[in-house]
Amino acid sequence: MKLLKLVSNQVKLGAPLPFNVRDEHGHLLLAAGQVIHGDRMLEALLARGIHADIEEIKALAAGRKVEPQKPTLFARWTRCYWGLDALARDAQPPEVFRAALTELGDSVQSLIETQPDVAIYLMLRQEGHALRMYGLTHAIHCAALVGLLTRRLEWPPERQRSALMAALTMNLACLDLQARFAVYGRLSQEQRDELRQHPDAAVARLREAGIDDEEWLRAVAEHHEHSDGKGYPRGLQDVGDMAQLLRLVDVFLAKISRRESRPALDLREAERQAFAEYPSSPLVTALIRELGPLPPGEVVQLANGERGVVIHRAAKPQTPIVATLTDKRGIPCQASMKRDTAEREFAFKALEADRQLVARLPPERLYGLLP
């Protein structure tokens, strides 16, 4: 496949894409027929680098229609980010909003059920995302992690769903502010005041759309409250367990995400801080057990000298499947090989300090083009 790098005037906002949009490796980002809704979406795509297959461009020039490519697993994640963007930005009738939100929740649920290891990998390895997308990616990852944890906690299915939807919508009113803070590291006093009111603003938006699940709405309203009374916006002390779970996940994922002003916090330090704040909480226990000692996305050294990144958990937490990043001499791999760390030659030796080994590495290279 020969690729042509696209520039802004080759993509029209609000119009169906005439061709499949790909990254620099040819992996699908958006299928033909999808719509780029706004400037933020276009800017983020252009910053990543978007391309089209030259053969598709020729087909269009010859008057032939380009058929949309079936989205890969990773393209489905991308669609979730932009689906949330459209929900937050577009003024829609209540029934349209509810239908779109239900579809988005179904998509996230399907992704974590079919490939939970990929979900965790994307949470931990966010280097490929532009910071201006932070609000979107953070919300989708929060919903995914809440979905995984409520399943581990064995909450009833209806509560699992309410918690996932609450996580998905808790920051609905502050996505732009989150992105701004990630990029610039500062907010004006007016913006800070707006941020403190975002739980109530999100609840109001949901009620206007006809959402009447009171536990979902309460969790959104309370997800920044704390039992010591020092949370916001009301300083409550009686905080529901669903709201506590949302707060735990929200803060934890924020800590392990980079900002322009600081690097991502080490995973184990983030876990230590969560345990220190809630030393006897079953929610923190579920978080630590779900991720395990070597979660997908962790960069490791192997006994044979290779370095790689964990891509799948195993029945024994200390023996995951690893995709190689370098050979025994430390030379970057042209193609990643899968290594089973249960085998002595490829056994886990140590955590790798050089996090840049996996920075901006397309996950498609590690996992393949999963359907």
Image (cartoon, rainbow, N blue to C red):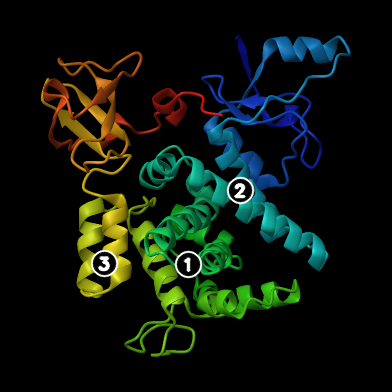
- Which residue is at a point 48% across and 48% down the rendered structure image? 131
Disc 1 secondary structure class: loop
Is 282 situated left or right of 342 in this image?
Answer: right
Residue type beneath disc 1: Leu
Q: Nearer the viewer, residue 143 or 285?
A: 285
The residue at which mark 2 appears reads as 107
Q: Is residue 340 above or below residue 151?
A: above
Which of the numbered marks, if any, corresponds to residue 274? 3
Disc 2 secondary structure class: helix
Proximity of marks 1 and 2: CB atoms separated by less than 8 Å: no
Percent position of residue 157, x then y: 53, 64
- Which residue is at a point 19% across and 29% down the rendered structure image? 341
Percent position of residue 74, x then y: 53, 35
The residue at which mark 1 appears reads as 187
What separation in Å lies between label 3 and label 2 (alpha carbons)? 29 Å
Give the number of the mark in front: 3 or 1: 3
Percent position of residue 221, x then y: 54, 79
Callout 2 crowding tier (Cα within 10 Å): few <14, some 14–19, many ≥20: some
Compare marks 1 and 2 and give the one earlier in the sequence: 2
